[in-house]
């Protein structure tokens, strides 16, 4: 081989090596969670830690499902899953409903202050959660809103601006001739929005909706604060963080890892189901139509 071919082979090999290293770096924490969830208390205390569940005496491969059984027997965990589903689905639905209306107005309609509104929406995403937590909690308590509606309203603070900003780019990328043709045919702006333009933004709706769902599903700080006086409304991240062992001063690491795996599975399934829409959504607004 000449120098050019050797250089091409080396560059290709380096690229694939980098891809493999990145994959291992990203996948290893999830693998370690599965590995730990399949170990008993004695196996978790083995030193050095093993990459697969091994018997403490003969080192044979011996996984166990006792951690998963303990998690599924935990009524608080089941309640937390239900609360998380209600909060995440409600937050995502409201974010898409309100955000698509706002994005249509910002992307296709003309009105004074549109640019300032966009930058204001972007600025809202820059505030850290802890900066608004105290004031927001005081407002929710003063209004007498219960924990679950309070979490839904508070999660809108970081899901709605993101949804509006991303959806605006997609509405802008749609040809203005579609809106003009609808108006010529006698359609109102609202009819043009939900009958013509909104179906074309389905990839964007799926992408932003999934990201909003993941953000609400995994949120911990607001959930811990708002459910401090209403334990029955705790979402699953808070429930997992407050797991207690059957023995005093025991850290139920295996059960925590099993619960983490269970909680992650719905998100993985959603990504696999909507993967084509997600790829289309990530690229559809990149090029001006």
Image (spheres, rainbow, N blue to C red):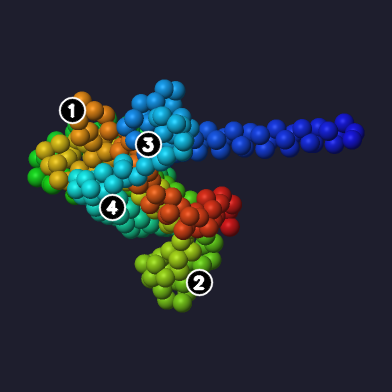
| Residue 139 x %, y % | 15, 39
10 Å crowding of disc 3: few (<14), some (14-19), many (20+): many
Please say if 182 is above or below 249. below
User: Is residue 173 left or right of 110 when viewed as pictured?
Assistant: right
User: Is residue 81 left or right of 57 when viewed as pictured?
Assistant: left
The outermost residue toward the right is: 2
| Residue 107 x %, y % | 45, 54
The residue at which mark 3 appears reads as: 39
The residue at which mark 1 appears reads as: 248
Q: Earlier in the sequence, mark 3 or mark 4?
A: 3
**Cα distance between the residues tagged 3 and 2:** 63 Å
Please say if 55 is above or below 79. above
Q: Earlier in the sequence, mark 1 or mark 3?
A: 3
Residue that appears at 77% across and 32% down: 10
The residue at which mark 2 appears reads as: 181
Relative depth, front residue between 285 and 227: 227
Q: Earlier in the sequence, mark 4 or mark 1?
A: 4
Q: Quadrant of residue 247?
A: top left
Relative depth, front residue between 136 and 87: 87
Tag 2–tag 1 contact (CB < 8 Å): no
Residue that appears at 36% across and 26% down: 45
Q: Earlier in the sequence, mark 2 or mark 1?
A: 2
Q: Earlier in the sequence, mark 3 or mark 2?
A: 3
**Cα distance between the residues tagged 2 and 4:** 41 Å
Disc tally is 4
Q: Nearer the viewer's eye, disc 2 or disc 4?
A: 4
**Cα distance between the residues tagged 4 and 1:** 31 Å
Q: Which mark is residue 85?
A: 4
Q: Nearer the viewer's eye, disc 4 or disc 1?
A: 1
Q: Nearer the viewer's eye, disc 3 or disc 2?
A: 3
């Amino acid at each position: 081989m000449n120098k050019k071919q050797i250089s091409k082979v080396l560059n290709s090999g380096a690229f694939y090596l980098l891809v493999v290293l990145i994959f291992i770096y990203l996948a290893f924490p999830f693998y370690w969670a599965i590995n730990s969830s399949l170990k008993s208390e004695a196996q978790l205390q083995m030193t050095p830690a093993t990459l697969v569940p091994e018997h403490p005496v003969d080192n044979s491969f011996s996984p166990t499902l006792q951690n998963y059984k303990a998690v599924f027997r935990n009524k608080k965990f089941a309640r937390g899953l239900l609360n998380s589903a209600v909060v995440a689905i409600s937050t995502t639905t409201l974010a898409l409903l309100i955000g698509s209306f706002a994005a249509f107005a910002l992307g296709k309609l003309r009105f004074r202050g549109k640019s300032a509104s966009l930058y204001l929406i972007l600025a809202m995403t820059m505030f850290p959660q802890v900066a608004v937590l105290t004031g927001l909690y005081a407002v929710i308590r003063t209004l007498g809103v219960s924990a679950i509606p309070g979490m839904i309203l508070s999660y809108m603070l970081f899901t709605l601006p993101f949804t509006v900003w991303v959806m605006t780019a997609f509405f802008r990328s749609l040809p203005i001739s579609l809106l003009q043709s609808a108006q010529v045919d006698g359609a109102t702006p609202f009819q043009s929005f939900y009958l013509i333009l909104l179906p074309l933004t389905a990839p964007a709706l799926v992408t932003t909706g999934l990201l909003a769902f993941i953000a609400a599903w995994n949120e911990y700080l607001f959930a811990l604060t708002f459910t401090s006086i209403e334990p029955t409304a705790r979402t699953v991240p808070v429930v997992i963080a407050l797991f207690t062992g059957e023995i005093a001063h025991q850290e139920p690491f295996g059960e925590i890892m099993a619960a983490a795996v269970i909680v992650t599975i719905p998100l993985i399934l959603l990504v696999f189901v909507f993967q084509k829409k997600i790829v289309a959504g990530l690229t559809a607004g990149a090029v001006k139509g």
